[in-house]
Amino acid sequence: MRAPARRVTDLSRLSRPASGAGVGGWGLLLALSACAPPPKAPPTSAVAATKIDAPEGAVLAAACTPTGPELCFNAVDDNCNGVIDEGCGVGTGVLQFTIAWAESAADVDLVVTDPSGARPTRDHPVTSSGLRLDRDCPRPKETETCGGQNTENVYFEGLEPPRGRYKVDVRLEEPYGARLPLSVQLSARIGAHTYTWELALKEKDDHKTFEFTL
């Protein structure tokens, strides 16, 4: 079976006409470029993770394998375009952290801490650095507002997140009778790369931590 084609990441290749296109190919390309709106300015510096510490007992899955169209609220970049739960009304940015779990009764929290020690919360969903708590489900006694989907999402608003050490903590706040260990999917988008882990939370207050440096 033929392996899936790799995505083109070198943008210079996208502006080169196919071999044999000749002068006419270049002329058409220039005409189309002249009509196109100016591209948005790229970030002033690359966003990339170093010194990654994966959650204890979890295997880092840094490579993305396309599995089909994007599915909503499973915390997976199914189509491998660098966006987690794309088209599902979930916020994204150069940093994005998403969890999802199947047991509807359990309450799991996603806590993201920036290099200054600030973290978005239910009462204060946006930090001064630009981290936003975008989706927080389920809420106690408000599970109907989540549409039956157990997911939480935090992302960075902007192009230049603060440099330094970040901490992403996934905690089982209350099982509420859910089967244990509880399986929780955690995905992180950091710049052009996505990372995925499947976590097993064994009891109330059990947590797994993922840390990285920008």
Image (tube, helix red, strand yellow):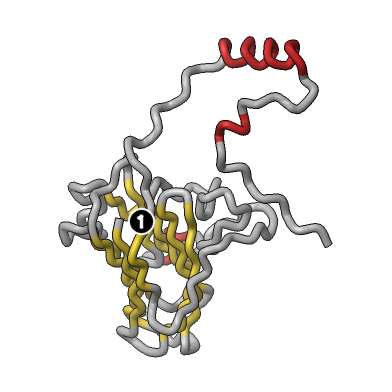
Q: Which residue is drawn at 40% across and 59% down?
A: 97
In the image: residue 130, left or right of residue 40? left
- Total marks in image: 1
Asked if residue 109 is positioned above or below residue 29 in the image, the reply reads: below
The quadrant in which the N terminus is found is bottom right
Say few, some or many: other residues with alpha carbon within 10 Å of mark 1 (under 14 / 14 to 19 / 20 or more): many
Q: Quadrant of residue 26?
A: top right
Asked if residue 39 is positioned above or below residue 90 in the image, the reply reads: above
In the image: residue 87, left or right of residue 204? right
Residue 121 image position (x, y, % from top left): 24, 60
In the image: residue 15, left or right of residue 183? right
Q: Which residue is drawn at 39% across and 73% down?
A: 54
Residue 156 image position (x, y, % from top left): 33, 48
Q: Which residue is drawn at 39% across and 76% down?
A: 55
Asked if residue 109 is positioned above or below residue 124 in the image, the reply reads: below
The amino acid at mark 1 is: Val
Give the residue furthest to the right: 1
Asked if residue 71 is positioned above or below residue 9 in the image, the reply reads: below
Residue located beneath label 1 in the image: 154
